[in-house]
Amino acid sequence: MLIIASANGAVGMDAAMCALRNGGSAVDAVEAGIRLVEADPAERSVGYNGYPNILGQLELDASIMDGGTLNSGAVAIMRGFPYAISVARQVMDRKLPHVLLAGEGAERFAREIGAEQWSSMLSDEVKGIWRERLIENSALLDMDAMDGDSPLLDAVELATDPERVAGTVNFIAIDGKGDICSGVSTSGWAWKYPGRVGDSPIIGAGNYADNRHGACACTGMGEMAMRACSAYGLVSYLRAGLPIQAAGQKAMEDLRDLGGDYIGGMNLIALDSAGNHVGMTTRAGSTYIYQHADMDAHREKERQFVEIPARWAGEARV
Ligand code: GLY
């Protein structure tokens, strides 16, 4: 039994491992681990108290995938329900012929299944940061005059920058039966355009698991993972027979071929069906965590660095 996670998953690692040790499935472990990250007020890129969109609304994305069946569930731009991963799991587990619910539909579903709903999803501190950053970054945004039709394009272009305020949590688990599950949860980019959906709830982009080959989950600039189908890409390299390290390297190198004006940071964690694991990053020194069932505590491991020159608004960025 094994769990790997992005470094910000540390608060949920004990709960996830406890689920596995008590005979729970990989799906149980991933959900248990991510829920604690979603509830952590100090984590600003996932769940409760994540950084909001440009209008100050917290919109959550999450997905979960069962590698035994390739069943998956996801929610996107969901407001008011902190445990996005649990709602995503219910999309997967309930008798519903869908994979992804978004916006009002996701919220309606969450209410219908009795998911926990919180009246306030942001602390006063985060509301203050939102206000301050938008004034600092975007003189174009007159927050006191904003209504449903206020133009946001210029303000979003100036304020949004995933290199400053991005995150997301990844968990991948292998349970006692050898089943693999991967899960991802995020509040997305800070100050994003309302309704923006990243890679986290998109199966194949930010998340993919297949017992036969392995699993991969991403953090970083979701638009890149969406365009390159990074999570599925890595698993398809495993399927083609590459070892995990080479599969990770290839999945990252695929991102170098992306054109366009906006290329930022990307990270992924992945494992193969034998439990070999890897973390890859465009940010030297960044880490991920792992724990086998016979370990007392998780360990941190440096990710393998892959250089992908970043550019923003078409300009090279250092
Ligand atoms: N990787 C998370 C996001 O771009 O929303």
Image: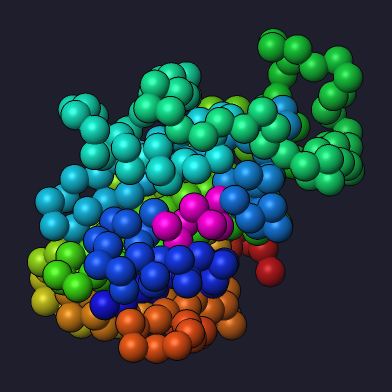
Q: Nearer the viewer, residue 260 or 48?
A: 48
- At a point 19% along the width and 29% down the height, the residue shown is 95
- At a point 86% along the width and 15% down the height, the residue shown is 145
> Residue 285 in the image: x percent, y percent?
59, 82
Report the side of 193 relative to 32 (left or right).
Answer: right
Residue 269 visible to the viewer: no
Q: Quadrant location of residue 155?
A: top right
Q: Which secondary structure is most common in the magenta stretch?
A: helix
Q: Is residue 272 above or below residue 27?
A: below
Q: Quadrant for the N terminus, please.
A: bottom left
Q: Residue furthest bottom?
A: 295
**In the image, residue 174 lies in the stretch drawn in magenta:** no
Q: Is residue 311 above or below residue 55?
A: below
> Residue 108 in the image: x percent, y percent?
43, 19
Report the side of 211 relative to 308 (left or right).
Answer: left
Q: Quadrant for the C terminus, please.
A: bottom right
Report the side of 147 relative to 283 (left or right).
Answer: right
Q: Quadrant location of residue 173?
A: bottom left
- At a point 41% along the width and 66% down the height, the residue shown is 16
| Segment tinted magenta in the rendering | 32-38
